[in-house]
Image (cartoon, rainbow, N blue to C red):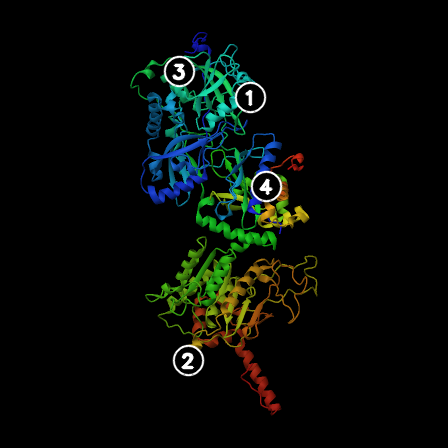
């Protein structure tokens, strides 16, 4: 038995305090937990075996945590888990099904149950054969698998069992903080242990200890025999070693970096010493390591004075009260949260990957690409056919998230081959509403998309509205207006000319960007509408002489789709055959036009003048003019006209027409002034818009001129063709 | 192209580990994980430097805890009446880093993976990691040095979310660094020769001399004096 003489009176020694052990629950552990929860555990709240691992303290500034990693679920040690100085700590985990279950769990009882297992291993002597059992830990957790949030409590390796006894434990005056002060007071049995280990000629103590450490034994005995021989032994040889001459030192891998206090694992070793070895003093070496080897300089040696606890040694003694719930990062007692959405949630990962791809463009080719501005653009797509599907997909590719699709139709059997968001399944049972089906497809392609579908029939001039239909038609107008007001860009992608009139007017009235794509059989038009007629003009580029006469006039407002017309839109489907009603076009045309429409939006979003950006153009046949534009993405044209038969495109600029039936000041003012009445009149009376804008008068004046001309000149003129 | 074969990656990495562990007189040690060239998919394993405390002087503030936790603190407080527990400022918020060097079969170059964690095992965000990186790294990235940007990337062997120094420009960079030497492609026979080994070691050190400092890892100049 170790020398009991020379024990100072209990009250002269300071209470030994232990440094709590930090747990580090690895992201890989949560990954595996999520997979197991879904596939195997499901609703089971049964305790699951785990295995953590740790090393002795390797840093002077940081303690080594108890790692609970992805291999913890193997129930043992998988490849690479025990390497170098790593030791295994067995443990278990309870996963509650609900947050309430977690909150209401009887944490005191769970802790006590965990402690009882350690206690049982100590009392039975099992812990001496397998010392890792002294470091047993328990984890209580709740996983929110939708948000990838995990809440957990870890009472790391015990200490629990010794709670009350600690009050009586005494320690020799603690070693002073300087790193060389590893010895206890003079005359202590282990004062020169480090020196003896270093000087040991018979056997390299480093190898002895390393062998034990490498064997995964977190606790072992060093026997310092007479002379300089030092040997390592398992805990179960305590009694046998006591029969031999020399000193026996209990060694443990100490994760704590402090030189002044022992780490948590010592608590349970001391409990074992009291219960099994029945000692009142115990020489202890807290082993630290550097680069996988024992670091004798930092290791702490001392003699611990233990209380006499007969009630613990009694046969069948109950497990003492336990302590050990870990503190949260903020230092409070309570659970911790691992929020891993950004790292593990597939939806968030997809979003990050999409953004990264675009970021690469910014880092490499286009440093001035303004992705936040672009991806925040709220896009309204009117028409979810061939053009609408292709525009939506290209917007997704640019990282645009917020996409609203409008269509009144359902998916028909001819659609999926041309309209890239639909499949055959969408055509069955009468067909899904196109807007809704397209929005669902966008979300399926990219869960980060905020896509919604609105089934809406856009009212059109020339399509007469009866008194009974009027409320529904006006409601549709109001809904469309609201959709346009809450958008940043409106795409006009419908299949008739007259269905573009109302959105053109509304975009002009609310000064919203409208981008129009229209198809012929082998020709297309992609254009942006100019700013609204009542919108404030863009600020003058130079502020020095704003009122000076002869200063450069502000650029002319750009035209809309209807600015070249001298007739108001009419019902273009009445009296037409089927092939004339359906847009019969070369299949490659729509994707080209749709792609250009989106690229036009992207280019314009990067123009500082935005909606007021003047039109860029190049003379036909000219090379791209160097320095023609300062915009990061090149030209920002007004109209692109494509001729597939010639595989060619032309940039065209057309200015706003002051008698336009959709975007002129007269129309917009009238709309603001009379609202619904004006709209109904426009729908029902085709000539109303022409009268309002002065087109009728213009035509009359022209006819008069022609008549005069004919009267003066006999040559025939084709009067009805402009 | 200034590429590296999987075999040469393994040889270069092994040499690098020796050099690092010889010249860096500190606690951090690179450890080889199965550098098994014969394994499937030309997997070359990786070398790891683990639990390196953050280079930044002060760990960032502890993030505010989720509102999920409301009402959870009291019942546990009752349990904490243990005077034998030393209460001292928690180091749970301290940042530590793991660095892995991995072979990229797609780019045929080495690349550097890193993962920042708090001591309690929770991952650092990219912003927190950026704040820990040497100040000059941020400058270089802003300056458009293409090979210096960090991207979220799954660890090829561990299937966990890590960050990587993107390898897409590495071959170009190595061409500059290795000059004429980069052009000699070591054939199967030559790979076994001394000169092949020297090239692999030089390549690896040259690569590390650029990639390492980006994340604050440096070797003393002496380490680059070649003695193979």
Name the residue carrying label 4. Answer: B12
Of tags 2 and 3, the one toward the viewer is 3
Horizontal relation, residue A538 to residue A500: left or right: right
Q: Residue A568 at x, y = what percent?
A: 49, 75
Label 4 to label 1, Cα distance in Å? Answer: 34 Å
Identify the residue at the far left of this view: A316
Q: Secondary structure at mark 2?
A: loop
Quarter of the image with the N terminus of chain A is top left
User: For residue A612, what is the image quadrant?
Assistant: bottom right
Q: Chain of mark 2?
A: A
Seen from the viewer's position, the closer of residues A264 and A80 is: A80
Q: Secondary structure at mark 3?
A: helix
Seen from the viewer's position, the closer of residues A571 and A279 is: A279
Q: Residue B206 at x, y = what percent?
A: 64, 42
Placement of A51 over or under A240, stated as above or below: below
**Are circles 1 and 2 on residues that touch, CB within 8 Å?**
no
Counting residues from the start of the chain, the first of labels 2 and 3 encountered is 3
Q: Chain of mark 1?
A: A
Residue A575 is tagged as 2
Q: Secondary structure at mark 4?
A: helix
């Amino acid at each position: 038995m170790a020398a009991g003489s020379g024990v100072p009176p209990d009250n002269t020694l300071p209470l030994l305090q232990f440094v709590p052990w930090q747990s580090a629950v690895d992201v890989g552990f949560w990954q595996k937990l999520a997979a197991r929860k879904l596939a195997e555990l499901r609703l089971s709240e049964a305790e699951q075996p785990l295995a953590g691992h740790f090393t002795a303290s390797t840093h002077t500034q940081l303690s080594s945590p108890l790692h609970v990693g992805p291999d913890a679920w193997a129930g043992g040690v998988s490849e690479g888990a025990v390497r170098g100085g790593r030791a295994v700590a067995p443990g278990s985990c309870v996963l509650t099904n609900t947050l309430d279950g977690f909150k209401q769990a009887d944490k005191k009882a769970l802790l006590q149950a965990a402690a009882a297992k350690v206690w049982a291993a100590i009392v039975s002597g099992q812990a001496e054969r397998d010392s890792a059992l002294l470091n047993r830990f328990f984890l209580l957790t709740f996983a929110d698998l939708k948000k990838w949030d995990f809440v957990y409590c870890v009472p790391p390796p015990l200490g629990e069992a010794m709670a009350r006894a600690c009050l009586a434990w005494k320690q020799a005056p603690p070693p002073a903080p300087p790193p060389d002060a590893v010895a206890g007071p003079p005359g202590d049995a282990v004062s020169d242990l480090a020196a003896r280990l270093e000087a040991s000629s018979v056997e390299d103590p480093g190898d002895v200890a390393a062998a034990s450490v490498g064997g995964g034994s977190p606790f072992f005995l060093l026997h310092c025999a007479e002379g300089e021989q030092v040997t390592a032994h398992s805990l179960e040889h305590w009694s046998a070693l006591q029969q031999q001459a020399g000193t026996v030192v209990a060694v443990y891998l100490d994760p704590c970096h402090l030189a002044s206090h022992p780490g948590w694992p010592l608590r349970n070793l001391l409990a074992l010493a009291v219960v099994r070895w029945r000692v009142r003093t115990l020489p202890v070496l807290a082993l630290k390591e550097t680069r996988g080897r024992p670091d004798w300089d930092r290791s702490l040696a001392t003699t611990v004075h233990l209380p006499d606890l007969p009630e613990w040694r009694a046969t069948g003694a109950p497990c003492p009260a336990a302590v050990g719930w870990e503190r949260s990062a903020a230092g409070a007692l309570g659970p911790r949260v691992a929020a891993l959405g950004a790292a593990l949630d597939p939806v968030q990962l997809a979003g990050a990957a999409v953004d990264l791809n675009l970021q690469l463009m910014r880092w490499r080719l286009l440093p001035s690409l303004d992705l936040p501005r672009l991806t925040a653009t709220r896009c309204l797509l009117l028409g979810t056919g061939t053009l609408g599907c292709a525009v939506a997909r290209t917007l997704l590719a640019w990282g645009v998230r917020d996409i609203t699709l409008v269509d009144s139709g359902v998916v028909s059997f001819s659609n999926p081959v041309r309209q890239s968001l639909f499949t055959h399944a969408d055509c069955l049972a009468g067909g899904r509403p196109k807007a809704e089906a397209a929005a669902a497809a966008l979300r399926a392609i990219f869960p980060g998309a905020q896509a919604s579908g609105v089934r809406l029939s856009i009212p059109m001039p020339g399509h007469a509205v009866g008194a009974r239909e009027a409320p529904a038609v006006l409601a549709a107008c109001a809904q469309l207006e609201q959709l346009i007001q809450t958008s940043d860009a409106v795409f006009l992608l419908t299949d008739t000319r007259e269905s573009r009139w109302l959105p053109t007017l509304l975009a002009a009235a609310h000064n919203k960007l409208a981008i129009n794509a229209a198809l012929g059989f082998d020709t297309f038009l992609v254009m942006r509408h100019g700013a609204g007629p009542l919108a404030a003009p863009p600020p003058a580029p130079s502020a020095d002489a704003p009122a000076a006469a002869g200063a450069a006039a502000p650029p002319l407002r750009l035209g809309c789709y209807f600015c070249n017309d001298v007739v108001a839109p009419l019902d273009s489907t009445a009296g037409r055959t089927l092939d004339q009603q359906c847009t019969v076009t070369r299949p490659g045309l729509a994707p080209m036009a749709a792609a250009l429409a989106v690229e036009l939006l992207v280019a314009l979003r990067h123009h500082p003048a935005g909606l007021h950006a003047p039109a860029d153009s190049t003379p036909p046949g000219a090379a791209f003019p160097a320095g023609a534009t300062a915009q990061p993405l090149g030209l920002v044209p007004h109209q692109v006209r494509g001729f597939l038969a010639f595989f060619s495109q032309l940039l065209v600029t057309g200015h706003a027409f002051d008698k336009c039936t959709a975007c002129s000041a007269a129309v917009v003012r009238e709309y603001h002034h009379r609202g619904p009445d004006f709209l109904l009149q426009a729908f029902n009376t085709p000539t109303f818009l022409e009268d309002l804008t002065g087109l009728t008068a213009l035509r009359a004046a022209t006819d008069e001129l022609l008549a005069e001309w004919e009267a003066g000149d006999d040559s025939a003129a084709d009067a009805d063709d402009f | 192209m200034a590429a590296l074969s999987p075999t040469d990656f393994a040889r270069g990495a092994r040499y690098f580990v020796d050099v690092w562990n010889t010249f860096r007189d500190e606690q951090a040690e690179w450890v080889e994980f199965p550098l098994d060239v014969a394994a499937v998919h030309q997997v070359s394993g990786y070398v790891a430097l683990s639990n390196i405390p953050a280079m930044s002087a002060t760990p960032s503030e502890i993030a505010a805890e989720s509102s999920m936790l409301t009402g959870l603190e009291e019942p546990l407080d009752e349990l904490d009446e243990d005077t034998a527990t030393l209460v001292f400022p928690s180091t749970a918020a301290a940042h530590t880093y793991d660095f892995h060097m991995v072979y990229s079969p797609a780019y045929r170059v080495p690349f550097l993976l890193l993962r920042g964690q708090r001591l309690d095992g929770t991952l650092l965000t990219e912003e927190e990691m950026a704040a820990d990186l040497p100040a000059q790294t941020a400058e270089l990235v802003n300056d458009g040095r293409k090979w210096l940007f960090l991207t979220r990337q799954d660890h090829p062997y561990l299937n966990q979310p890590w960050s990587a120094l993107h390898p897409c420009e590495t071959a170009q960079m190595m061409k500059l660094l290795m000059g004429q030497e980069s052009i000699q492609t070591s054939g199967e026979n030559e790979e076994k020769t001394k000169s092949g080994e020297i090239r692999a070691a030089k390549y690896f050190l040259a690569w590390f001399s650029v990639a390492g400092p980006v994340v604050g890892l440096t070797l003393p100049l002496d380490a680059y004096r070649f003695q193979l």
